[in-house]
Image (spheres, rainbow, N blue to C red):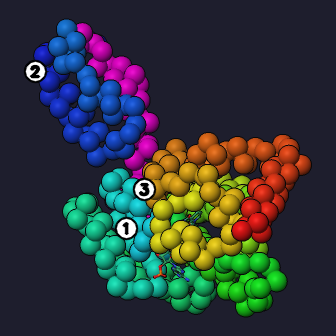
Amino acid sequence: MSCYVKPIQCKELYEKLTRMTSTLTHSHAGFRIVRGLNLTALERCPWLLYFAPWGLNLHKEFKINRFLGKNILITGASSGIGQDIAMEFGKLGANLYLIARDSQKLQNASAKLQEKNPGITIKVFSSDVSHPEKIQKTIQEIADREGGIHTLINNAGILGLGLFESNTLENFKKVMETNYFGAVYATQAAWPYIKKSTNGHIGFVSSVAGYSGLIGYSTYSPTKFALTGFAECLRMEARDYGIGVTIVFPPDTKTPMLEYEQIHTLPECKALSKNAKVMTSSAVAQKFVQAIVQRQFEVVCNIESKIVRIMRVLCPGVYFKMVDGIVDKDRKKRNKK
Ligand SMILES: NC(=O)c1ccc[n+]([C@@H]2O[C@H](COP(=O)([O-])OP(=O)(O)OC[C@H]3O[C@@H](n4cnc5c(N)ncnc54)[C@H](OP(=O)(O)O)[C@@H]3O)[C@@H](O)[C@H]2O)c1
């Protein structure tokens, strides 16, 4: 077989590769290599093109952009992290189905996403993940009408704040119904459809509070711990069907939820998070979607969260001393005033 490729063919092939990869994940190294290729070098050594699909990892690129034209459902997609997750999937050319309770907020989010991604399908559905019948009906409707479900992102969540003794049983149940059971209901409804699709995926948005419990979060933190356990069990069961599972543990992230938290949280919690870096919702979403693309299970978003995670597991005594120390110091300071 001849290895000779005329320069003109070379140019055509280069242009074709560039066109093809422009629809793929932009952060991937292969894309940058193709974009940065020196055409003269290719023209001088056309045989290089024979190795292109391997050398440039193009085969991986094609596998990676398995979200192009696929149906992605995102709960809690009308603001904050959920809206930015939708934006990341929009960049991959997926069809977006956004779920939240408030229709107006959904419409606004959809308009923003459509403006940034004019070519893609975006539809909104007002539903409540804490009502099993409502969310199951919504998910079935989307799947039946739109031709199945490829990926479900369980992001919808609410905050629970305050000391254990100041919270009612109702508060505990309400937060658990949304943050944990909401994800269980949605996953149960979407599961048969995701099973039918090739390389489907289920994503969960937990929190740093999903692996470390702190004062003032007794209603919220257990819901995220539960989500961590659920995702871990599901990961093993989903393998049998080629379904990937990913869970992200965001630290404090700049969203409407954090704005509310910063006003209403206990002074002790403010002291604990005083020096912690706040991430943007788009940075969290980028890390999460990148991990989904690479079919990784866990995403711990920044170095501080990683340190907390390692300390909590490897030296819990030191970790507890550290957080208790911060709280005691803050209380002393406030008592002096
Ligand atoms: N912001 C942070 O610092 C932070 C840190 C760690 C983890 N997280 C987690 O990240 C996720 C997103 O939070 P966010 O910070 O982006 O907050 P956000 O801006 O308040 O977004 C929450 C989203 O969930 C929706 N939602 C709430 N209850 C729902 C329900 N019962 N049914 C359907 N949708 C519902 C909200 O829309 P409607 O109100 O219209 O329904 C909204 O779209 C949550 O799971 C949260 O626990 C956030």
Q: Nearer the viewer, mark 2 or mark 1?
A: 1
Identify which residue, 62 or 281, lies in the foreground: 281
Horizontally, residue 285 falls left or right of residue 37, namely: right
Quarter assignment of residue 163: bottom right
| Residue with the most extreme top position | 44
| Residue type for callout 1 | Leu
Is residue 316 visible to us here?
no
Q: Check disc 3: other Cα within 10 Å, few if <14, some if 14-19, many if 20+.
A: some
| Residue type for callout 2 | Ile
Q: Position of residue 30 (x, y in %)?
A: 37, 31
Q: CA distance from mark 3 to mark 1?
A: 17 Å
Q: Is residue 64 magenta?
A: yes
- The residue singled out by tag 3 in the image is 282
Identify which residue, 98 or 174, lies in the foreground: 174
Residue at image location 73% in from the left, 48% down from the top: 309
Residue at disc 2, secondary structure? helix
- The residue singled out by tag 1 in the image is 96
Q: Position of residue 18 (x, y in %)?
A: 23, 34
Q: Is residue 186 magenta?
A: no
- The residue singled out by tag 2 in the image is 8
Residue 92 higher or lower than 160, as above or below: above
Q: CA distance from mark 3 to mark 2?
A: 42 Å
Residue at image location 24% in from the left, 9% down from the top: 45
Q: Earlier in the sequence, mark 2 or mark 1?
A: 2
Look at the image and give the residue range highlighted in magenta: 45-74
Horizontally, residue 1 falls left or right of residue 43, namely: right
Residue at image location 42% in from the left, 86% down from the top: 102
Q: CA distance from mark 2 to mark 1?
A: 40 Å
Quadrant of image for the N terminus: top left
| Residue type for callout 3 | Ser
Residue 232 higher or lower than 154, as above or below: above
